[in-house]
Image (cartoon, helix red, strand yellow):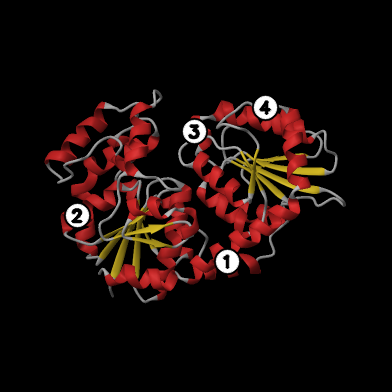
Amino acid sequence: MKSVAFFSMLADGHLRRLLPLVAGVVARGWAAHVFTHRRFEPEVRAAGGQLVDLFGRYPLDAADAASFPIAVRSVAYAGHYAAAVQRDLEDLRPALVVYDTFAMLGRVVATRMGLPYVNVCAGHNVAPERFQRILAADPRVFVSGQCLDAVQVLQTQLGVADASPFSYVSGVSPYLNVYGEPPEFLTATERKVFEPIEFFGSLPAAGELARRAALAEPLVFRGAPATFSLYVSFGTVVWRSYAAEALSALEAIAAGVRRRPDVEVVMSLGSASVAPEHVAKLRKGSVTVLDFAPQWSALAEADAFITHHGLNSTHEAIFHRVPMLSYPFFWDQPALAAKCQEFGVALPLATAPREALTAASVHDALDRLLDGRERVAGALDVARDHELRVMAGRDAVLDRMLALA
């Protein structure tokens, strides 16, 4: 049986974007070996893949336990473990390697083995040169000695002449790049950076969508009569770098919605560690605070969504036709927020990333959203059609990908 090797680092959202590809490969009779952390095994199995416990055998901290942001450590990881993982991969004899952009290890090993490799783009319009410049100028970035040593190994021993601590954003493939949004989210000029490119979207595979629709999951919202249901989540990654800013924003949102007795709120903390006294401050009146919310279910019930505009969150909201209030923090989020506002599916909650919110500004933003709901609903119908159209073309993308093998 022919097989494909998939590589993902520890970011939940990035792994989720690989799973529809895993399911598609398996549906065509190929084996899918997914190199990632063992905590993702239930999701990998559900997609039909076979998990390879990458981080159990090759721990990330042994390669780099200090660089910041954490994604920089994926470069050290590639330099530290590429030779060993290549030996593992040779035993499986895959015909193709597919990797999330951050999983530089997959690209390095595929190149060394002479295999074709497919990059699954990590985020909205993450053009390598521009984002590498942003990272180089960010004063919060710290590159450990371990990472610098690994970069040297990548340059001199592993054939990556242009390796740098920020190579985790530059993994564009000369074979094929699979993009996690409909084509409407890139201009003709923007998409040239990712050529050759195929648009795949980031939503779950059709079979997974059907399974979720069939599940009778418990309600996330209490659903009191005459209430407007507001879901609030900043994902998981934001809390690693901007915990204080995220908490401050949630406190302002909680204060703002208390002025609206018709609004019921569910807030997700994205499994972040938040002190009980802060949670208690949020959890008053109509505000429910969850350590982690089942987002798919929450969006199926919500009337509106305050979001950081992570890629998965944004497109899940569009699929469920949920209007958004934009509160981006960093990375690709401001640009994706602006794109959604341009399309009319979101309104700004702030005028700049991480801008301080007040109860009054939150209250006013909700008023604007409620007043424009009919207009936003029409824009969401159009955007959802884009999502459905790109999903309908997935078979052709999978055919092109497997033809590389």
Q: Is residue 88 above or below residue 347?
A: below
Is residue 25 at all visible to an observer of this figure?
Answer: no
Marks 2, 4: nearer the viewer: 2
Question: What is the number of the mark on residue 240?
Answer: 3
Question: What is the number of the mark on residue 403?
Answer: none
Q: Is residue 395 above or below residue 168?
A: below
- The answer to whether the residues at label 3 and label 1 have Cβ atoms under 8 Å apart is no
* Residue occupying image coordinates x 70% and y 48%: 304
Residue farthest along the top direction in this orientation: 139
Q: Work out whether mark 3 precedes mark 1 in sequence or the reverse, and give the earlier one.
A: 1
Is residue 291 at all visible to an observer of this figure?
Answer: yes
Mark 1: which amino acid? Leu
Report helix, strand or loop for mark 4. Answer: helix
Q: What percent of the width, then of the height, locates residue 144?
A: 29, 27
Q: Work out whether mark 1 precedes mark 2 in sequence or the reverse, and give the earlier one.
A: 2
For label 2, count other residues whose C-alpha is less than 10 Å away and answer few (under 14), some (14-19) or many (20+).
Answer: some
Q: Work out whether mark 1 precedes mark 4 in sequence or the reverse, and give the earlier one.
A: 1
* Residue occupying image coordinates x 60% and y 28%: 355
Question: What is the number of the mark on residue 111?
Answer: 2
Residue beneath disc 1: 209
